[in-house]
Amino acid sequence: MSWVVRNLWLIPVLPALAAGLSAVAKQRQRNFAASLAIGSMGGAFVLSVCALWHAISLSGHAGVVREVVNFQWLQYGSEPLKLGWMLDPLTAVMLGMISFVGLLIFIYSAGYMADDENFTRFFCFLSLFAAAMLGVVIANSLLLLFMCWELVGLTSYLLIGFWYQRPAAAAAAKKAFITTRIGDLAFLIGIVWLYSQAGTLLFYDHGAGCMEQTALMHLVAQSAWLGVSASTGIALLIFAGAVGKSGQVPLHVWLPDAMEGPTPVSALIHAATMVAAGVFLVARVYPLMSAHAGGESALSATTALQVVTWIGAITAVFAALIAVAQDDIKRILAYSTVSQLGYMMMGLGVGGVAVGMFHLITHAFFKALLFLGAGSVIHGCHGEQDIRRMGGLKRFMPITFATYAIGMLALCGFPLFSGFWSKDAILHAAQEWSISRVPFYFGAFGALLTAFYMTRQVCYVFFGEDARDARLQQHAPHESPTIMTMPLVILATCAILLGVIGTPAWPWFDSFLNALPTTVNGSRFFEGGVLLVMLTSSLVVFAGLGLGWWLYGRERIVMGSADVLEDMQPQLFKILRNKFYVDELYQATFLRWNAWLSRVSDWFDRWIWSGAVRAVSYVVLGLSWVARSADTYVVNPGFDEGCEAVRDGGRAFSRLQDGLTQNYLRLVGVAFAVLVIFLLWDGGR
Amino acid sequence: MSALLSPISCLTAVPLIGAVAVLALATKNGKLARGLAFASTFVSLIVVMVLWHGFNPASGGLQFEEVHEWIPALGVQYHVGIDGLGLLMLLLSAIVTPMAIAASGQIRENVPLYVSLMLMLQAGLFGTFTALNFFHWFLFWELSLIPAFFLIRLWGGPQRAAASTQFFLYTMVGSVALLLAFLAIFLCTGTFDLMSLGEMARNGQLLPSFATELGWQRFTTEKAALLLCLGVFLGLAIKVPLFPFHTWLPAAYAEAPTGTTMLLTGTMSKMGVYGFLRILLPIFYVQLRVMRTSLLWLAVATIVLSAYAAFAQKDLKRILAYSSINHLGYCMLGIFSILKFTGDDPVLANEKAAALNGVLLQIFNHGLTAATLFWFVALLEKRSGGLRGLNDFGGLRKVIPVFSGLMGIALFSSLGLPGLNGFVGEFLIFKGTFPLAAWPASVSVLGLLMTAVFILTILQRVFSGPLNERWLGMPDLSKGEMLALSPAIALMFVLGVYPQLVLGVLNNTAVQMVRQLRF
Amino acid sequence: MTPLTSCLLLSALLFSIGLAGALVRRNAILVLIGIELMLNAANLNFIAFWRYGSHAEALTGVMFVIFSIGVAAAEAAVGLALIISLYRHTRTTDVDKLNSMRG
């Protein structure tokens, strides 16, 4: 086993250490914290590259090469609970992507957050976040993954609520944590269920892991409830966790609100890491998701994968529709993230690990680019986020504009950009899906919408005329400092070029993840309708771009006027702008029920259970009152009366004792006479 | 070796001597009283450490056992001893009591009496956690109740009279039920010894012995046994507390001076759980098994409803009080789930061991975390002049960042965040409970969600948002306070990352308990 | 009428006179004299029952009477002494005024 695998744990531990050190650092030690965070991330990046290189050097042989290191964490009964880490192609590419994008975002943050008073704290949270995310990726145990997963949730909470003095940020942080936790708790049930069935939570343990053949066969054979096999039930519960983290419908509501955090956080959370964790999780437990009973055809998708596909497809279109009508530059990107995550899920569902993961990787780069670009715009516009109050920025911020445009084209899937190849792979797989063609149409429609809303956004922000507030007019928008533009340029390069690792002609990425030999073969373009799908998607993208330009770019947007779409379809636009009223729906149902239930249980405590106790105490009090009354009004007077009678009798008798001797004598005489009479009468019998 | 020199007897004597010393030497001097109390708790902690050191974790049985005749005519022996469970409880009591005394800094009136009552309470705890004879055990069980009553009654908040009376009467009712049940058992079996009663239950001798003494005509032996079981159950369920016997708790916790609340939640509520494991389970598991389903759902109701009720509270102490009920609910869930009859199945026996390990760990973790959280509330009260409403603050992170950070850690530990102590216990409980009782385990997950909701609400209302101008000058934690808090916080991290430290001592006890419940 | 009956009648008459004296007179000395009369009536009974009884040779009646007279003499002495000492205190011998023994 190579030293890289043995020391893989260092990758998350380095940023974690940095977080620990900057947690105890003083607020004013800004450079210390920043350089510590960036240095540790750099170290993690170097190690990740080594790991990636190691994984690549091992690939190409038969079978996926997995190297695992397991250790005992604790023991209960006679069973050890083992945790561990692993290196396989999936881990390797995620490590590479996270540490690279993370490093760039760290560097960018040093510029973006330079004026913030809690700079040190920011880097502490950021490092901890990166550590948790890297931990998710290297974990070889569902439990370890879950632990890091929860820490990702914690740090996202801390980062989204970083500007804690804004009530909106505090609320958004709470919402993010709780919404994702709803999914996490289903995930937890899935974990304990899997644990009870498989007897281990290690993914791979030389044949004994829960993602390996023996355990999967057992799981498929177990039927749980209503005819659902245990494997499906567990897979769906785990997927619920992924739905929460990756912002899929119906748990997507937290993600747009999470834009309350600083922009680098949005980039980190929404591009490279947290939301990707859900997709990664599905990819990681893919063997479970796709586990078949022996008899069934291996080609038909499992129930779990069908659910993944449908949720992904619905999310892709749903979020794209909402994004059309948003005005906040970051919110548009947030909804586009939700939509793209839907694509990834769909890709996993219809095409397998490589298809979904490829989009995850390309998306990480161009979405990070877009968020950082948006951050640069916001930075340049002094904190303005409403696209209707921007405009004409391409003159002031050329580098930002150029890189942003590249990111936008990559996101739209403009031919030859990285997003094109990855999205195409998904659409192609969807087209060939055996269950239904609907996801394919959803995907194509989503692509159209993506191109449309991104064009709309770019037209509002970079074209047209300066529409900023009068009070801000005096400060001309400015290009951001080099520390911020440099990461943009690097990311833009990747956004263009990264596609080459996954073209149909040279599907290196796919082969790497599936451990197949790679060859360059241009003829694959002409097989199985690949070209047709590419043409379709290109046409769709062009249509979207054209439509967007026709509506928003053709004429200069007049400041303060209503949106073009709003003029055309005011009702529909209102629904979209209000995000299909999902928040309102939740507010009116779950949150209200929840609040109601909590009031009810409080009320029950106060009045029913306490009331029962109080009732008992009142009964006891009543009884004691009765007893006291009996004492006061019956027993005591009775006794008193008795005493009084005795005393009166004594007094009456004492009157006989008048001290006059003759009276005594008289009495004796009378008594004597009575005695005599009695004796005579009775006759002495 | 004479009785007084053995470590367990020593341990129970130390706080009693401390209490007497405080009353004798420091009648007026509060500072001296506190110093003496600290010294006494420190000695106790050392004795516990000696026990920990001398404890053989490879054995799940009783250790340091000691038997003397006491009142032979009544079957009363002086029988003490500890296993992993007892040791854990002793450690918890030894840790929480000095914390509670340290957190009672704002007590100004009659300090010597206050600290000596606390020490007496500690003696009650030590006695309860070591005694193996019912009579002896019950004596200390009640001994701990009396100081608690006076602590609430004399130093409590505005509603203290009602709260303390309710607390006392409620627990007293439970104790009476407990005592009556045990008198009946003594009548039938002629012994008060918990170990031999457990032995009789396992050998199936307990029920026949009930038949000879309690067999009335229209009252079968099973029913008699069930009645006795319910009597003991009531006494323990009130102490834990289990829904719906919990209503004394929020009032008592909220009205008690915060140092006392720490003792109440950190250790006294654990007496109930301890009683379940030491008394009810070994002796009455047959009867409990009959009621298993209803008991499980009672535990679920405890978990879920208390979490919901916590969300509706406005007073920080009441929120934390309900959260205590919620956390102990998980212990109850784990305990009731292992009642399932599984025969000799080794897999399910392991799941039971996991659940029981989780319960024991949860007891310790909750004691530590809840006590620390109440300590933070005490510190906050000290700064705010007694205010502790959820809406009285706002944006405190700005003025007291260190305080907020450390309290945040404790809150997240209570939430069950991985990496902190709360998670491991809860995970093991769920892990063990799920295969034994899938639906109750799944439903009680709702409690975890609501815990997150109300804990984040605390963080949001108290520490985030715009700063409430009123608290502009609030001082952050002082060096001394940080120093006092740091062991607790450090322990949260240590147990979160390396739970084996405690589990290593507990596991064999848990395994032995599971083995005894096999029948 | 047998001699016994006559004697008993006489003695009853004597007793009644004594009783009346003791009850009616207010002078303590006369009350004492009344009591003496009653005693002597009893003595007369003793003698009569002895003289006309079945065991006249046994001298029992005489013995009783001698004793009785002795006791009566002692009693009279004590009674007179009491009266004198009362008189010294209260300057009266009127028994209606001597009610200091009232209960």
Image (cartoon, coloured by chain):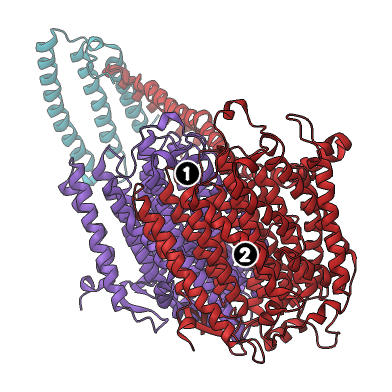
Measuring 77% from the left and 30% from the top, which residue is drawn there? A561
Give the chain coloured cyan.
C
Give the chain coloured purple.
B
Q: Which mark is residue B317?
A: 1
- Residue A445, picture quadrant: bottom right
- Percent x, y for residue A203? 61, 80
Location of residue A283 with respect to A592 vertically, above or below: below
Left or right: where A38 falls relative to A458: left
Location of residue A492 with respect to A76 vertically, above or below: above
> Secondary structure under badge 2?
helix
- Percent x, y for residue C28? 20, 14
Rendering colour (chain A): red
Q: Are marks 1 and 2 on the same chain?
A: no
Location of residue B235 with respect to A306 vertically, above or below: above
Please state which of residues A118 and A332 is positioned toward the viewer in this rendering. Answer: A332
The answer to whether any part of residue A224 appears in the image is: yes
Left or right: where B377 falls relative to A148: left
Q: Chain of mark 2?
A: A
> Secondary structure under badge 1?
helix
Say which amino acid is labelled 2.
Cys
Residue under circle 2?
A: A494
C-alpha distance separating marks 1 and 2: 54 Å
Please state which of residues B322 and B499 is positioned toward the viewer in this rendering. Answer: B499
Left or right: where A154 falls relative to A345: left
Q: Residue furthest bottom?
A: A62
- Percent x, y for residue A322? 77, 47
Q: Residues within 10 Å of mark 1 (few under 14, many from 20)?
A: many
Say which amino acid is labelled 1.
Lys
Q: Residues within 10 Å of mark 2 (few under 14, many from 20)?
A: some
